[in-house]
Amino acid sequence: MIILKHPDEVEKLYRANQIVAHLLEMLKEKIEPGVTTEELDRIAEEYIVSRKARPAFKGYRGYPATLCTSINDRVVHGIPSREELKEGDLVSLDVGVVLDGYYGDAAKTFPVMKVSKEADRLIRVTEESLYRGIGKASEGNRLFDISHEIQQYVEGHSFSVVRAFVGHGIGRSLHEEPQIPNFGQPNRGPRLKKGMVLAIEPMVNMGDWEVKILSDTWTAVTADGSLSAHFEHTIAILDHETRILSRAA
């Protein structure tokens, strides 16, 4: 069942998502060669707690950290470690928080200083696919209009969308219905309605779309070793507009 949110609930979700948004902006300034993902995780947890919120991922189904930090061919759910970032790496940071019982969730992929032209193109195409998907997230459209728009844009640039992981509804739970694939046919799925709050998150591989899970049981990597990028925003469908809750104000 898709849970529609009242305006006061949307405001609570907005406040949770603003913590996520500002945290990602702060972490962007920390990304440089030599920094470990473990250090980024420590900074993230301290920031979240200082805002009287709590990390949403830590402890979720046993996940051990505040951030998901996925480097290069790691798609999602990379666990922070003592591994140092290097110039030319891509690092995806996925962040979730809980504030007053409501969840915020967003992700971005950052270049570590100068990256290859193809890596830079992967980042730009993935981010743009997110905004094109959001452009279809309006009252009266269907859910797979979002999915189709993302897939068409990504594949039009000769990249592929991951099938194994999808976006989701969000509210008082981190993962609510509906699931939001990044692929599919338009004019299908539930009709989008006012009060829906959705976390849309294209994961895009430079090569094939298939992934595999490492022995840590969390980290998903591209099956062919190609680079991957990940962008996510939490949005709310309102009267005559779609509001991006996780964009920093």
Image (cartoon, rainbow, N blue to C red):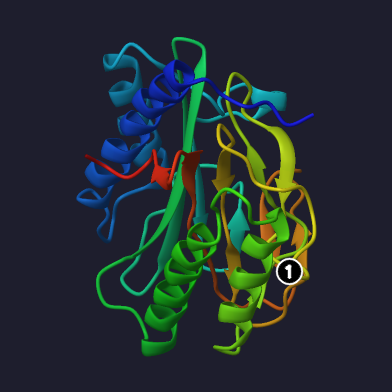
Eyeballing the image, is 209 above or below 49?
Answer: below
Q: Residue at x 43, y 80 (%)?
A: 119
Residue ID at (49%, 51%): 232
Residue 3 in picture, x, y percent from top left:
68, 26
Residue 12's place in the image compared with 208, above or below, is: above
Number of other residues with Cα within 10 Å of mark 1, as a class: few under 14, some 14 to 19, many 20 or more: some
Q: Quadrant of the N terminus?
A: top right
Residue 245 position by quadrant: top left
What residue sits 27% from the left and 16% below the top?
A: 50
Residue drawn at (45%, 22%) of the image: 7
Residue at which label 1 appears: 186
Pick the residue in front: 71 or 238: 238
Q: Is residue 241 visible?
A: yes
Q: Amino acid under label 1?
A: Pro
Query: In the image, residue 213 lies at what x, y percent?
Result: 76, 55
Q: Is residue 81 visible?
A: no
Q: Circle 1 sits in a helix, a strand or a loop, which is it? A: loop
Q: Nearer the viewer, residue 172 or 48?
A: 172
**Quadrant including the C terminus:** top left
Within the image, what quadrant is residue 110 found in?
Answer: bottom left
Taking the image as shown, residue 30 lies to the left or right of residue 203, namely left
**Number of residue marks:** 1
Q: Does 37 sit left or right of 178 as displayed? A: left
Residue 88 in percent (x, y) is at: 35, 75
Q: Is residue 125 above or below residue 188?
A: below
